[in-house]
């Protein structure tokens, strides 16, 4: 059994309009939401084996909040440039390249790709993946290379403003 945790980066700052989109940092709300969503995910009993992120600053920092919550070093974080402005095909390509030794993988990326990809996975549809939203599915296979064609089971969808 494999589990995918799809995460949109936390809320980013628009304070400095001279920064390139790729370099935008998190704003204050994002700095609060990232650790909160990491904690909520861990509190569900999910153990993450590998973290894969867009190298954009806001996505990378969101992934680091999750690494910190899981008390793991940055050696568990892989930066994949194809996750910045990713298409659905980019997500599939990234997932299908994962070593089968990893059972639970968290992928950190951006909209609109994250929402589009989440809606491809199961019958559970979302209008929009909010910042720091977490969408989780599992599938019964030994290899990530089987991800695209495998039947996936929706496990949960959570986001910072979700009433608990």
Image (cartoon, rainbow, N blue to C red):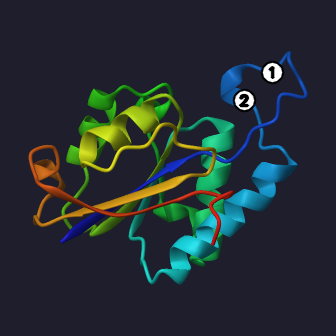
- In the picture, the quarter occupied by the C terminus is bottom right
Q: Residue 82 location in percent, x, y?
A: 41, 30
The crowd level at tag 1 (other Cα within 10 Å; few <14, some 14-19, many 20+) is few
Q: Nearer the viewer, residue 25 or 122?
A: 122
Residue 97 visible to an observer of this rendering: no
- 5 to the left or right of 23: left
In the rendered image, the residue lying farthest to the front is 163
Q: Nearer the viewer, residue 85 or 56?
A: 85
- 105 to the left or right of 81: left
Q: Are marks 1 and 2 in contact (CB under 8 Å)?
A: yes
Q: Residue 7 location in percent, x, y?
A: 50, 51
* Quadrant assignment, res 162: bottom right
Residue 90 visible to an observer of this rendering: yes
Disc number for residue 164:
none
Mark 1 = which residue?
19
Q: How many marks?
A: 2
Residue ID at (25%, 36%): 93
* Quadrant assignment, res 113: top left
Residue ID at (36%, 25%): 87
- In the picture, the quarter occupied by the N terminus is bottom left
Task: Kindly report the distance in space between the C-alpha atoms of the residues bearing marks 1 and 2.
Answer: 6 Å
Mark 2 = which residue?
23
């Amino acid at each position: 059994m494999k589990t995918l945790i799809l995460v949109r980066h936390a809320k980013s700052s628009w304070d400095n309009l001279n920064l390139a989109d790729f370099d935008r940092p998190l704003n204050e709300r994002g700095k609060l939401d990232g650790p909160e969503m990491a904690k909520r995910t861990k509190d569900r009993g999910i153990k993450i084996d590998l973290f894969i992120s867009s190298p954009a600053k806001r996505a990378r920092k969101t992934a680091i909040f999750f690494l910190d919550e899981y008390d793991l070093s940055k050696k568990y974080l892989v930066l994949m440039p194809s996750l910045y402005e990713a298409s659905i095909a980019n997500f599939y390509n990234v997932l299908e390249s994962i070593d089968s030794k990893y059972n639970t993988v968290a992928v950190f990326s951006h909209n609109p790709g994250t929402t589009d990809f989440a809606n491809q996975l199961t019958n559970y549809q979302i209008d929009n993946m909010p910042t720091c939203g977490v969408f989780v599915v599992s599938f019964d296979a030994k290899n990530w290379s089987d991800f695209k064609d495998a039947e996936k089971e929706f496990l949960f969808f959570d986001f910072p403003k979700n009433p608990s």
